[in-house]
Amino acid sequence: MCVKKTRECKTSFFLGGAGNDSKIAWVKWESILLPYGAGGLNLGSLKSKNWALICKWWWRFKSETTSLWVKVIKSIYGPSGGFELVNDSHVSSSTWANIVKAGGVVDSLGLSFRDSFIKSVGNGSTTSFWNEVWLGDVTLKSRFKRLHKLETNRDAAVSERVTWDGSKMAGTWCWSRLPERRASKRAD
């Protein structure tokens, strides 16, 4: 009789051994994953289920912007939650960092993970102007570093920087000093 931990009991049942004893497996893992009708236990792919759960965390972060856990993640990893570090190999190994890195793994498979999520801006009060990816795969603060440095409120929401009067859109800027135009370099 198996009185050990539940996980060990299940493992020993499927693998045909107990404790340190190594015996022949009773059932092929591929067979366990099959649907009931095909003689399996209908578990499905555990790897696929794990990916689905990771994707759900991405979605929840993007949609539950006022939740306490989202605020905690933002306080640790910054306003974008560390998503700009998806392909950075120097990211820490915390659980959240692993969730963020998962997007890079999906991207490496040829699927655009980030493009699978569309954020509704709504009235713009909960959407960051500088820290969201608007075009391509880079945030505005990364694309326009010089302007971001001049910004007085680097965590400004869209509603603080863009106004809409029903017919036209206008920008509302708060610079620490006026931006200077850079002279273009000419080849002589």
Image (cartoon, rainbow, N blue to C red):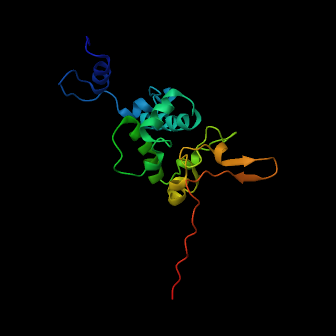
Q: Is residue 135 left or right of residue 24?
A: right
- Find the residue positioned furthest to the bottom: 188
Residue 3 location (% of width, % of height) = 26, 11
| Residue 168 drawn at (x, y percent) | 78, 53
Q: Is residue 150 above or below residue 37?
A: below
User: Going 35% across and 37% down the picture, which residue do you hit?
Assistant: 94
Residue drawn at (44%, 25%), measured in percent from left and top?
Answer: 41
Q: Is residue 143 above or below residue 152?
A: below
Identify which residue is drawn at 54% across, 34% down.
Answer: 60
Extreme residue in the front direction: 177
6 or 143, nearer to the observer: 143
Disc tally is 0
Residue 79 visible: yes
When asked about the image quadrant of residue 136, the answer is: bottom right
Q: Residue furthest right?
A: 167
* Image quadrant in which you'd find residue 119: top right
Q: Residue at x 65, y 44 (%)?
A: 160
- Pick the front one: 41 or 44: 44
Residue 21, relative to residue 108: is it above or below?
Answer: above
Side of 40 where 60 appears, left or right: right
Q: Quadrant of the N terminus?
A: top left
Q: Position of residue 107 (x, y in %)?
A: 48, 51
Q: Residue furthest left?
A: 20
x and y percentages locating residue 179 in the rendered image? 57, 62
Q: Is residue 138 visible?
A: no
